[in-house]
């Protein structure tokens, strides 16, 4: 139950929504599916004076652009995206990541933009501060941090929990951002500040309007896993996504992107582990070494009862499998291209 009053607006376009945000200042917030915002309003993390619903705006269907990239409307429901036949065929890692979010009811309501922009989470932050945790933490404007009492007052280690962001970052996706003065386009990776106090590089009157996924490169393969105790019913312990590309002849890795989410303030690129793979033959030892390096490189925060050592072990094992799946798919794609050329 939400026990405070607020005004409600329902614009017909995103531009009208941006205008309302500009006119009403920090007290205004947008709501799309509400699967993140409404629970935060209930426990009073968020206290908007004006709630701007995007529910009257019909999202456009995913479309292939002239350069072969795919544009996905940020207001698209996750359930629609996971079932879209073009997306399943062209960018299956994306649809797998959408399917990993929550339960069916969450995916029927939740939107792509909302999943990418959800607030960071902490067991101490995401509950009503009324009897057990009375003093507000840093993120609520207070002067304490319950789980990490040695943190400075401007440091919050709440964790970003998007299941979809790591997959899109691994694919090199970009986002369109709509503001009062027009539209700009940035890499999705640049959306995340790695600052738990202000995790998103969005102005108050800016909205994500679309995600642009570049064409899948030849001889590339992907792997994805969300580690949880109860599958999609849980927020993740870690989310692992990888895209690997091979050369045309010798099976050498020419490009690697490894992204791990749900372990820090934003999704993390395992850059040092990527360098282990680039220029190497992707045999079992090399993939295992990259998984070991990545699991430690990201320096995970303990959260939701998971210890750091347990999280590192989990990433080491399952990232190794994710990389092996990506390498196998890349090899199959390379062999398929070679066979087509021979014919």
Image (cartoon, grey):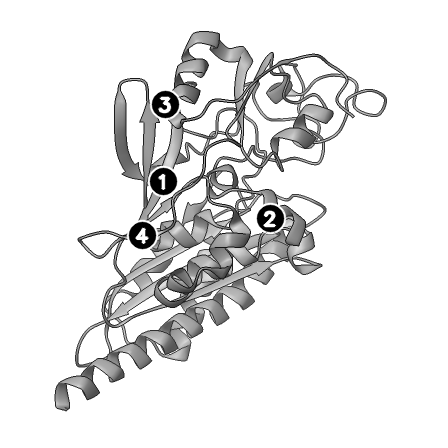
Q: Nearer the viewer, mark 1 or mark 3?
A: 3
Specify which label sits upstream in the sequence, 2 or 4. Answer: 4
Q: Earlier in the sequence, mark 1 or mark 4?
A: 4
In 3D space, how far apart are the residues under numbered discs 2 and 3 (Cα atoms)? 25 Å
Q: Residues within 10 Å of mark 4 (few under 14, many from 20)?
A: some
Q: Quadrant of the C terminus?
A: bottom left
Q: CB of mark 1 within 8 Å of CB of mark 3?
A: no
- Kindly tell me whether residue 4 is visible in this rendering: yes
Any mark on residue 108, and which? 2
Label 1 or label 4, whichever lies nearer to me, is 4
Q: Distance from label 2 to label 1 (Cα)?
A: 19 Å
Measure the alpha-carbon separation of dots 3 and 4. 21 Å
The x and y percentages for residue 28 are: 53, 15
Residue that carries the numbered disc 4 in the rendered image: 63
Q: How many marks?
A: 4
> Which residue bears the numbered disc 3?
15
Disc 1 versus disc 3: distance between alpha carbons?
14 Å
Q: Residue furthest left?
A: 342
Please name whichever residue, 314 or 202, is drawn nearer the observer in this view of the structure. 202
Viewer-proximal residue among 248 and 80: 80
Q: Is residue 103 visible?
A: no
Of all residues, the one furthest to the bottom in this rendering is 343
Q: Earlier in the sequence, mark 1 or mark 3?
A: 3
Q: Left or right of 318: which side holds 47?
A: right
Q: Earlier in the sequence, mark 3 or mark 4?
A: 3
The circle drawn on residue 210 is 1
Residue 315: percent from left, percent from top: 54, 60
- Which residue is rendered at x = 65% and y = 54% of the image? 104
User: Which residue shows up at 55% across the image and 46% down it?
Assistant: 263
**Residue in the image at 53% along x and 64% along y:** 316
Badge nearest the viewer, 2 or 1: 2
Element carrying mark 1: strand
């Amino acid at each position: 139950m939400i026990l405070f009053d607020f005004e409600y607006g329902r614009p017909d376009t995103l531009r009208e929504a941006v205008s309302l945000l500009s006119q009403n200042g920090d007290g205004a917030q947008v709501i799309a599916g509400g699967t993140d915002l409404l629970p935060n309003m209930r426990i009073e993390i968020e206290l908007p004076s004006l709630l701007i619903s995007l529910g009257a705006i019909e999202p456009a269907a995913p479309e292939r652009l002239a350069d072969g990239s795919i544009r996905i409307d940020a207001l698209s429901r996750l359930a629609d995206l996971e079932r879209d036949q073009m997306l399943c065929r062209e960018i299956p890692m994306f649809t797998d990541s959408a399917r990993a979010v929550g339960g069916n009811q969450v995916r029927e309501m939740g939107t792509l933009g909302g999943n990418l922009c959800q607030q960071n989470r902490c067991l101490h932050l995401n509950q009503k501060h009324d009897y057990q945790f009375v003093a507000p933490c840093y993120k609520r404007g207070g002067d304490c941090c319950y789980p990490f009492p040695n943190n400075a007052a401007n440091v919050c280690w709440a964790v970003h929990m998007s299941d979809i962001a790591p997959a899109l970052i691994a694919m090199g996706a970009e986002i369109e951002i709509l503001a009062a003065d027009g539209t700009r386009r940035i890499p999705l990776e640049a959306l995340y500040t790695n600052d738990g106090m202000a995790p998103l590089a969005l102005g108050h009157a800016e909205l994500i309007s679309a995600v642009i996924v570049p064409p899948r490169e030849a001889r590339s393969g992907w792997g994805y896993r969300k580690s949880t105790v109860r599958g999609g019913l849980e927020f993740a312990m870690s989310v692992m996504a990888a895209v690997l590309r091979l050369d045309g002849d010798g099976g050498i890795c020419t490009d690697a992107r490894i992204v791990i989410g749900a372990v820090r303030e934003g999704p993390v690129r395992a850059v040092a582990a990527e360098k282990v793979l680039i220029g190497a033959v992707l045999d079992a030892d090399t993939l295992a070494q990259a998984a070991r390096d990545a699991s430690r490189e990201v320096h995970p925060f303990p959260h939701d009862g998971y210890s750091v050592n347990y999280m590192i072990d989990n990433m080491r094992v399952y990232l190794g499998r994710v990389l092996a799946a990506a390498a196998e798919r890349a090899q199959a794609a390379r062999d398929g291209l070679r066979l087509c050329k021979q014919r």
